[in-house]
Amino acid sequence: MLSMSPSDTRPIVEPRFFTFAEPPDAGLPLESGRTLGPVTLAYETYGRLNAKKNNAVLVCHAFSGNAHVSGFHRPEDKAPGWWDDMVGPGRAIDTDRFFVVCSNVLGGCSGSTGPSSVNPATGKPYGLDFPVVTIRDMVEAQRRLVDHLGIPKLLAVIGGSMGGMQALQWAASFPDRVRSVIPIATTLKHSPQQIALDEVGRQAVMADPDWNRGGYYGRKPPEKGLALARMIGHITYMSDRSMEDKFSRKLKDGKVSFSFATDFEVEGYLRYRGDNFVKRFDANSYLYITKAMDYFDLSGDRLFGNGRSVRTRFLVIAFHSDWLYPLYQSREIVHLLKMRGVDATYCEIQSTYGHDAFLLEIEEESRLIRHFLAKTQDIAGREDG
Amino acid sequence: MLSMSPSDTRPIVEPRFFTFAEPPDAGLPLESGRTLGPVTLAYETYGRLNAKKNNAVLVCHAFSGNAHVSGFHRPEDKAPGWWDDMVGPGRAIDTDRFFVVCSNVLGGCSGSTGPSSVNPATGKPYGLDFPVVTIRDMVEAQRRLVDHLGIPKLLAVIGGSMGGMQALQWAASFPDRVRSVIPIATTLKHSPQQIALDEVGRQAVMADPDWNRGGYYGRKPPEKGLALARMIGHITYMSDRSMEDKFSRKLKDGKVSFSFATDFEVEGYLRYRGDNFVKRFDANSYLYITKAMDYFDLSGDRLFGNGRSVRTRFLVIAFHSDWLYPLYQSREIVHLLKMRGVDATYCEIQSTYGHDAFLLEIEEESRLIRHFLAKTQDIAGREDG
């Protein structure tokens, strides 16, 4: 729950944890056929659930995100949550109006159960004994959290990139539990190029001898492999143009070294981002979460089933210069929605930031989301009397 | 020299070697200020130099190419040279008309002097003691070969990708030695995105403990790191669309494995290409040659110097869907040429193959090149009487 700290006007939020599928429960049934339990989800909430329980917005995070979407954990924190510009008092996802929930995904490494969690069967971290989970499994776990929080129907599920896949999956898995969906910079299914990029990231991790077939807990983790995977990722998050704008061919030390040291600023940036990432992310989670994205495929009849009438409203947002989740993938979502007569709005936002745009083009994105949520709330208000 | 074998009509070509800068020569002076010697270039020739010595075409290979551009070394060879569709009897670069030369680049690992060559000072492979070379250095070495072959002025220098950089460098370094230049799918300078992609490839090699700071000769080479670098490369050589056409989401075994084995055909393809590459390529050459590309910058006045009149003719070719060397980079070349009043033709070829198109869109490319070479030969014939 988000609150103001007495000494500071910075909104302070507390990390929370919800555990389910504990024995004697048989565990959370997974798409693979395996079960997993107990399962803990790390989550945060902001604002208050209203009396009609119809103002809840679920925010789903992208690949390397976490539950900390807004505000600060401690007044001395340097940086706020990862989408603080979008979520907070007076922001587009207005915590004065909405009850906002964000949880770390199943398989993650920021408080939710994942490969670095202790396997109750062995008393040791799962490592590769952790089952391969899917976006559907992640959403199934989120549904338990939503039940736990007493939310009968979400006003909206919103997310960018892998968060958008989860939002789409909510519409597929629990159409009666979600009034609207906002998939941003995402896709109905991972393309072979997206799978290929994920695969080289995984191979980078697995080629690192410190990976040790996933059994590196309590030892040196595969830092080089994970940093390398992240470097590849960062190239795909930016655009050719945004790299040109930010780095051009600027040299770190004014001249080339005629060696394999860092010559160009862009090289230093990538190494820095790679090295920083390994401090906060688990290499096995990298494998599991990218695999979940690669398995994701709601194309064809998978999004809505065959013939079912769809009452969920959609706002689909995509960005020019995003080459990781190109415009055509969002247009495919919209095409599918329109073919089914679904109430869907589609917006393409001009940007040079590439895939990162969903975290950076806040102003235009905010306007679209604010308006869409207000309208959805109007409809909810009328329907709920 | 290309010839027909008696038992077969397949054109047989013999690998050749040219060594220069031997003691007491002080060595080949390099852009870094260092010198290198002796230097050997592996090369092949096809067709015959005519009496006027004005029918020589120099083909420059791309990053992982070699001197074997056409024909077969042995009648039993399964595959011909890397651009056999383009270079040969009756082909666009017609070996019945032209004397075609192709050499492995300085720094390479297919017969020319590179980091895997023996350092005469130590009697051991250079490894990282090999000097960092540039595209200019590569072209300087080629010029010695052209001298050796008795060619006063090349009819054309042609190449795709890094081969195109060498072609441009010829116009910059030796404007009086080259009548025409055909840069294909290339750039005046590596962009930060291109540098970034090269840098992750280098980091992949250098993160492999078998790399051993370049000192792996006679031991296990850094196969995993080099395969990984090559996998990244292959993603950039294809387009999103060509990957979709070739692989879509096809599964290797009909269903997903819920493991980190190879699920999708695209994953299997990348692993195969990566594993194959390490059998034929030296990891240190990977570092040196990508560095040469990253240093490449003929923008501004660097291509022609200031005010010099330019008599070299240009045919610039680029491909739609090539996102590694995008159209705008070829347009920048053409813009620079036109600003200087240079005789330049620019063609964009429709293709879905991505950067690989320069090796695949042979039909349209051939038509353009055949016509351009014929016209250049006409001009040469008139000028040379």
Image: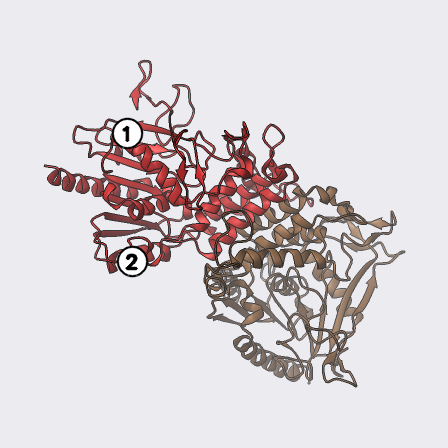
Chain colours: A brown, B red
* Disc 2: CA contacts within 10 A as few (<14), some (14-19) or many (>=20): some
The answer to whether residue A137 of the structure is visible from this angle is: no
Does residue B10 lie above or below A240 as drawn?
Answer: above
Quadrant placement of the C terminus of chain A = bottom right
* Disc 1: CA contacts within 10 A as few (<14), some (14-19) or many (>=20): some
Q: Which mark is residue B336?
A: 2
The answer to whether residue A102 of the structure is visible from this angle is: yes
Q: Which residue lies furthest to the front in this view?
A: B24
Report the Cα–Cα distance between label 2 and label 1.
Answer: 32 Å
In percent of width and height, residue A95 lies at 69, 81
Q: Are marks 2 and 1 on the same chain?
A: yes
Q: Quadrant of residue A176?
A: bottom right
Q: Residue B149 carries which label?
A: 1
Q: What element carries label 1?
A: loop
- Of badges 2 and 1, the one in the foreground is 1
Residue B191 or A73: which is nearer the viewer? B191
In percent of width and height, residue A20 lies at 83, 62
Left or right? Give the position of B38 relative to A122: left
Q: In which quarter of the image is residue A89?
A: bottom right
The numbered mark, 2 or 1, whose residue comes first in the sequence reads 1
Residue A40 or A227: which is nearer the viewer? A227
Instruction: Kindly identify the amino acid type of the residue bearing the numbered disc 1.
Output: Leu
* Chain to which the residue tagged by mark 2 belongs: B
Q: Residue furthest right?
A: A24
